[in-house]
Image: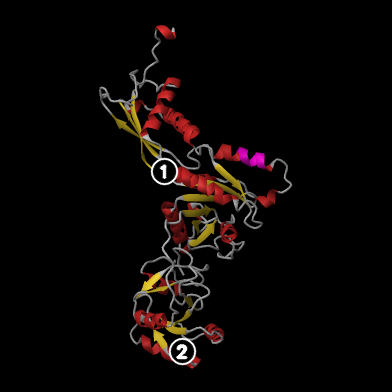
């Protein structure tokens, strides 16, 4: 029902089943202790399978499609329906333990609503309220007791990087996730807005793991549905804040639109690595100079992305999908890269001889004293100067260009912090002066 990562096969699992709008997502959120699955009083809100790991009194449980134990929920307020009967008929054929629970019985006399379901010939029936938490503990105690004994998998040595798949509705994000994972993990449909929850998928490629997060399509603000979709968009933007790299998916058949330039700007502003995926590239087969035209559009519409990383893919045919992993490694390395202070200041000395900083508005000389890297993800550099207001955006762009030419920083934004240093320390090695090189007798 919700997801941190897909389940390791060695963990015992529980699946939560039932017809639409019986409270499966609410029940799931109750188990894991947080609102991770979208909940709305409309049928069909949850469309994809969601995974998470939950601990109940020392045992591990996950909601997946193929489970060791099944929990079937009914809606006590609606009463028994023909669809409930069909679900039970199908579950009778299962050889796995099945637990039946009547949800939404938190009202006065609510337990009397359970009686109608005894007509199904199943026992016991668990009266529960996922919203209030009533009866959930008893149900889980009995369900967990039927789980097979398995050892938990070893903890990974490092946490897998989080890769957000962002884009407008119907650009092929879910198809791309399925191609990356090698299974039909996310629901794919030509109707925009099919994906509503953020769907996580842990993918291993050449002994490296990546946690991909497929998100709901982000429309223009004026076109967002005022109910369920606003939660989906909020979840997608929250995914942006917690990810390491963004795959911004663009539909090649439609070209680049304003919404995608805005999304790219949000990614850069958030300090995240960025790869532009021109998806559905199979639709351009046979189109003369299609690549040149797209490259021209990227240069024109994304001028704020220096040396953008661009891949041409097709989630449907898997064209270019495996190339994504290599580019992800390059961008992740760029986001985490550190340069020593000595290297930075030697570079800046060369740059100042090549192009000293301009004077400030009053015509006063601007001195650069010291450059150091203050952080990563994104790479952040701290520049000490006597006149912070004299450091122009143009000069910072020049410094950024030189840093990238020397050290790469592929696919990641670079940030500068300008700090005031009133006086230059005497005798401090490595401090930088903005002055023209002296010409001595031997240099004349």
Residue annotated with mark 1:
378
Q: CA distance from mark 2 to mark 1?
A: 56 Å
- Image quarter for residue 141? bottom left
Q: Is residue 294 magenta?
A: yes
**Figure check: 292 above or below 135:** above
Q: Is residue 350 above or below residue 59?
A: above
* Residue at (51, 83) in percent of width and height: 96
| Percent of width and height locating residue 89 | 55, 87
Magenta part of the protein: which range?
Answer: 291-296
For disc 2, the marked residue is: 117
* Picture quarter with the C terminus: top left
- Which tag is nearer the camera, tag 2 or tag 1? 1
Mark 2 vs 1, N-terminal side: 2
Residue 28 place in picture, x, y as percent: 42, 72
Residue 130, image x and y in percent?
38, 76
Residue at the (62%, 61%) spot, across then down: 190
Q: Residues within 10 Å of mark 2 (few under 14, many from 20)?
A: many
100 vs 339: above or below: below
With 161 as the anchor, is 278 left or right in this view?
right
Disc marking residue 19: none
When the figure is inspected, residue 333 is found, relative to residue 39, above or below; the finding is: above
Which residue sits at x=72%, y=45%? 287
């Amino acid at each position: 029902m919700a997801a941190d990562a897909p389940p390791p096969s060695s963990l015992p699992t529980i699946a939560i089943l039932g017809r639409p709008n019986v409270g499966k997502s609410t029940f799931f959120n109750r188990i894991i202790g947080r609102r991770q699955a979208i909940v709305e009083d409309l049928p069909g809100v949850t469309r994809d399978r969601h995974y998470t790991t939950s601990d109940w009194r020392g045992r591990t449980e996950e909601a997946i499609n193929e489970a060791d134990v099944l929990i079937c929920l009914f809606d006590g307020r609606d009463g028994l329906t023909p669809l409930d009967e069909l679900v039970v008929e199908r579950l009778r054929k299962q050889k796995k333990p099945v637990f039946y629970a009547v949800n939404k019985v938190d009202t006065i006399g609510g337990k009397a609503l359970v009686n109608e379901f005894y007509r199904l010939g199943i026992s016991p029936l668990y009266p529960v309220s996922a919203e209030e938490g009533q009866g959930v503990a008893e149900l889980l105690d009995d369900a967990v007791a039927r789980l097979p004994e398995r050892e938990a998998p070893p903890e990974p040595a490092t946490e897998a990087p989080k890769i957000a798949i962002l884009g407008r509705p119907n650009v092929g994000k879910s198809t791309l996730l399925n191609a990356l994972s090698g299974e039909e993990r996310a629901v794919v449909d030509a109707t925009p807005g099919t994906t509503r929850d953020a769907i996580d998928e842990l993918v291993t490629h050449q002994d490296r793991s990546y946690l991909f997060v497929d998100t709901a399509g982000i429309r223009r603000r004026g076109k967002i549905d005022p109910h369920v979709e606003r939660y989906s968009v909020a979840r997608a933007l929250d995914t942006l804040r917690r990810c390491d790299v963004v795959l911004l998916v663009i539909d090649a058949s439609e070209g680049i639109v304003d919404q995608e330039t805005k999304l790219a700007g949000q990614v850069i502003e958030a300090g995240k690595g960025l790869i532009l995926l021109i998806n559905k590239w199979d639709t351009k087969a046979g189109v003369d100079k299609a690549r040149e035209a797209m490259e021209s559009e990227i240069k024109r519409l994304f001028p704020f992305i220096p040396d953008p990383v661009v891949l041409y893919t097709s989630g449907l045919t898997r064209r270019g999908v495996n190339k994504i992993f290599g580019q992800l490694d390059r961008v992740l390395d760029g986001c985490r890269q550190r340069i020593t202070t000595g290297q930075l200041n030697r570079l800046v000395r060369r740059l100042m001889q090549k192009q000293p900083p301009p004077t400030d508005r009053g015509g006063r000389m601007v001195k650069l004293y010291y450059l150091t890297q203050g952080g990563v993800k994104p790479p952040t550099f701290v520049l000490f100067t006597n006149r912070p207001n004299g450091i122009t955006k143009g000069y910072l762009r020049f410094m950024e260009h030189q840093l990238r030419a020397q050290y790469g920083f592929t696919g990641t934004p670079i940030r500068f912090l300008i700090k005031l240093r009133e006086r230059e320390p005497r005798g401090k090695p490595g401090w930088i002066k903005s002055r023209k090189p002296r010409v001595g007798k031997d240099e004349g």
